[in-house]
Image: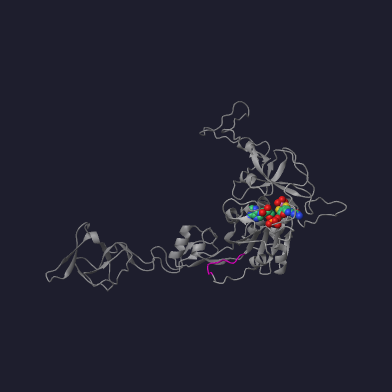
Amino acid sequence: MTTAPGDEAGSPDPLHAPPTPETGPVHLAHTWEEARKAAFEGATPIPPGRVPLGQALGRVLVEDIAALHDMPHYASSAMDGWAVNGSGPWIVSEPGQRLAPHQASPIVTGGLIPPGAKAVLRSESAVLGTDEDGLPLLQTGGTARPGEPRNGQHIRKAGEEAVEGDVLVKAGVTLNPAHLAVAALAGHDDLLVRGKPVVKLLLTGSEVVAHGLPAPGQVRDTFGPQLASVVDMLGGIYAGQERIGDSYPEWLAGLEDLPPEVPDPAALPADVVITTGGTGVSHTDHLRRAVAELGGRLVIDGIAMRPGHPAVLAELPDGRFVLGLPGNPLAAMMALSTVGAPLLAALGHGTMPPIQHVPCGTTIEPEPGRTRLMPFRLLYGMASPAKHTGPGMMRGLASADGVMVVPPHGVQLGEPVAAFALPWGPPLPVPEPAGAKPKTRAGAKGATRTAGKGAAKPAGPVDWSALLG
Ligand SMILES: Nc1nc2c(c(=O)[nH]1)N[C@H]1C(S)=C(S)[C@@H](COP(=O)(O)OP(=O)(O)OC[C@H]3O[C@@H](n4cnc5c(N)ncnc54)[C@H](O)[C@@H]3O)O[C@H]1N2
Ligand code: MOO
């Protein structure tokens, strides 16, 4: 928690103040664009690794899945009934033994076909009686059709699905549940998949409570409920969270990644640790000091943007990245979009998250020296800044269609402004090239009819909800 006076309303502070001749230039190492680039270029794609089948869903396969044995690997019965050799009647012998001609033995579905067996007679097509010596004798009967059982009937032959070495799934696919089942049938316990960053969360702040209504001085945690899913949407593997207070030893231990007292073989080592809070300059903000004590280096130390300017990206000597998000909820999500999204994309073999342009629905005044990230709602195809977007708020982002990247020199009404989609939201609309004709399908159900030259009525009812903020 930052105990120095906050900057909720944009009051002067050492980092936000514009440069003056007295103070000299404010040093925020990176512009918004530079920070994205530094995060993307500072990370190398994680090499492929083997993961157990239970953790392979959604991963990209790097090595073909080939059958490690014939599938099925033994001949088995497809029915409950009798394994038989030759035509009936059959003398009944012990299960599993070699069958001589005119011998049969009981078998269940999936059971190993005994040597000598030529077919399986379903139990409902068989009648078990006795011969004149009182010994068990099997005959066809019941529902048996003429000629039943034919040679090979109801026997699943070994190798009828695949023979050893057959390629079942080609490298490059994104693994679905059926692929995992095939891999199991083929005898695999794990698969070689493309690297993907494992992310752990370190949520800090002794004032943060995870349940119920917080007392004055406490805040309800906004990160626990959302960050795991956002990490997943950004291409990471969420691997758990730890909550700590504001003391330096807790920070140090939280970042140290000491092996647990009881080792957990299923635990994944983190590639990225995302911390929340503690990026400020008060006596309770320990991120930079802990990184320094662990021998880490700062890749990004502050970004000329708002909100989210104190964001930090560091790399520890063991190769883990530490992404320090500011404690203010909206600031944290903007820092995550700016630094976390490119970082996770690069580690996971992805491309730089795209930036598009949307027409700005209002004029936004210049604010020299920093980029502003403004959640917006689309209103008649124009980006209109959402309300309730203070650094500590989430209401505006919760109703937003995307985030505008407003350059320091501002934007004019109608001018295209850079923007990005939200990880959980639909893609931003692609603007139609100037002069493009509206698409119509002649005779299509519900197609808009043009009334006169080029005039088109809106296709559906007008959505006024964006006006409500
Ligand atoms: N003297 C200065 N003070 C501050 C500056 C500055 O430049 N000079 N920058 C302000 C800005 S901007 C931000 S952003 C914050 C960064 O603060 P920290 O990263 O150190 O975070 P904390 O101080 O721990 O918390 C800030 C704020 O966020 C609340 N918080 C923390 N965790 C959670 C959570 N899990 N869920 C909801 N809210 C959380 C915390 O209670 C504080 O209100 O520094 C400013 N100050
Ligand atoms: O407002 Mo701070 O800019 O929350 O990052």
> What type of secondary structure mainly makes up the magenta span?
loop
Q: Which residues are magenta?
A: 264-270
Q: Position of residue 454 (x, y in %)?
A: 63, 29
Q: Quadrant of residue 87?
A: bottom left
Q: Position of residue 431 (x, y in %)?
A: 65, 41
Can residue 132 be seen at all in this image of the molecule? Answer: yes
How is this picture coloured?
one colour
In the picture, measured across the screen, residue 312 lies left or right of residue 56, that is: right
Q: Position of residue 196 (x, y in %)?
A: 59, 61
Quick one: which residue is furthest to the bottom in this view?
Answer: 97
In the picture, measured across the screen, residue 58 lies left or right of residue 101, that is: right
Quick one: which residue is furthest to the left in this view?
Answer: 132
Q: Position of residue 308 (x, y in %)?
A: 71, 53
In the picture, measured across the screen, residue 28 lies left or right of residue 383, that is: right
**Does the magenta run of residues contain 269?**
yes
Asked whether 59 or 17 is in front, the reply is: 17
With respect to residue 406, does 223 lie above or below?
A: below
